[in-house]
Image (cartoon, rainbow, N blue to C red):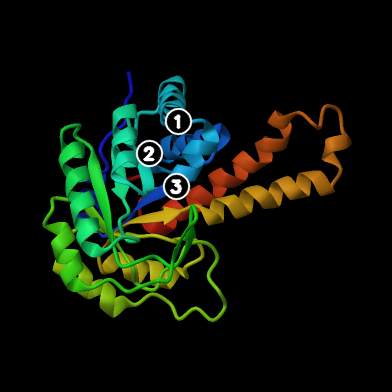
Amino acid sequence: MNKFVSAKNMIDKAKAGKYAVAHFNINNLEWTRSILEVAQETKSSVILGVSEGAIKYMGGFNTVVSMTLALLNDLNITIPVALHLDHGQSVDSCKKALDAGFSSVMFDGSHLDFNENIKGTKEVVTYAKKKNASVEAEAGTIGGEEDGVIGSGEIASEEDCKSLAALGIDFLAAGINNIHGKYPKNWDGLNFDVLKNLSVASNKPMVLHGGSGIPKDQVKKAINLGISKINVNTELQEVFAAVIEKYVTEGKLNEYKGFDPRKIFKPGMEAIKLKAKELLTEFGSLGKS
């Protein structure tokens, strides 16, 4: 029987090989199946990220684990797949995810006093290691909004990164002028000097949140400076929505059984797969498993 793996090994390999593992957020069964199919077709390891909001939408931690694990086996997925709690807002959420069967968690204590961030991260690391699961922490804040938590884009400090790294985390997210959601036209770009310093200070694989829409040359440079995991959600949502809109505006709903959700979602699933394959190529992780 197939099962989830810790994300640690795949991300350590990515850091050594100067590429980035794709972390694709999933939002429903169609999303999950699309990502797993393209990962298998291209023999590319992936991380399936699930936000607390998406978990609530899909019914709960156990529902997400059961659905995703069943797809691994029914689709005969043989490449490594990690199931990762994205932006776990509390120690309790991380523990619930791990108890349900998640193989990786992010404790996002960036909204807390730093001493509380340290305390929570330490507790999550201790709990996760007993289950052979990987842990991501966050220093500074990522700009934009994620499940109601708004970050101003605070640049992380080297000392904070060192402190979090010392707790035994496996990879580290840090604010380097990246944001969740769409990037505004007046965005200044990633702060590469900060990234370089934080990567050296932490000596951990670095995570780039808000990976949707960053120019390719900046993505490549970020990977060379230590980014080993890139989170993507918005870009897949955009291509999915665009083809569904096209389906409706072209009158496909009025065709024979055009209202069947399986017909409505099919072009959206294909769009997700095409975009995911494009991003795997961009991140250098296509065919890496």
Quickly name the residue at label 1: 64
C-alpha gap between disc 1 and disc 2: 23 Å
User: Relative to residue 178, is residue 194 drawn left or right?
Assistant: left
Q: Earlier in the sequence, mark 1 or mark 2?
A: 2
SS of the residue under disc 1 = helix
- Quarter-of-image position of residue 46: top left
Q: Amino acid at mark 2?
A: Lys
Instruction: Decide which of 204, 37 is in the foreground and name it.
Output: 204
Q: Amino acid at mark 1?
A: Val
Instruction: Decide which of 128, 5 is in the foreground and name it.
Output: 128
Instruction: Decide which of 63, 234 is in the foreground and name it.
Output: 63
Q: How would you rate the neighbour count of disc 1 (Cα within 10 Å): few for under 14, some for 14-19, many for 20 or more?
A: many
User: Relative to residue 174, is residue 153 drawn left or right?
Assistant: right
Quickly name the residue at label 3: 24
Report whether residue 155 is seen. Answer: yes
Q: Earlier in the sequence, mark 2 or mark 3?
A: 3
Eye-nearest disc, 1 or 2: 1
Looking at the picture, how far across and down is residue 151, in whole percent? Answer: 42, 66
C-alpha gap between disc 3 and disc 1: 15 Å
Quickly name the residue at label 2: 43
C-alpha gap between disc 2 and disc 3: 15 Å
Q: Are marks 3 and 1 in contact (CB under 8 Å)?
A: no
Eye-nearest disc, 2 or 3: 3
Q: How would you rate the neighbour count of disc 2 (Cα within 10 Å): few for under 14, some for 14-19, many for 20 or more?
A: some
Q: Amino acid at mark 3?
A: Phe
Taking the spot 40% from the left edge, 71% from the top edge, the residue there is: 153
Tell me the tag on residue 239: none
Query: Quick one: quadrant of the N terminus?
Result: top left
Looking at the picture, how far across and down is residue 76, in whole percent? Answer: 41, 23
Taking the spot 38% from the left edge, 47% from the top edge, the residue there is: 86
Taking the spot 29% from the left edge, 29% from the top edge, the residue there is: 99
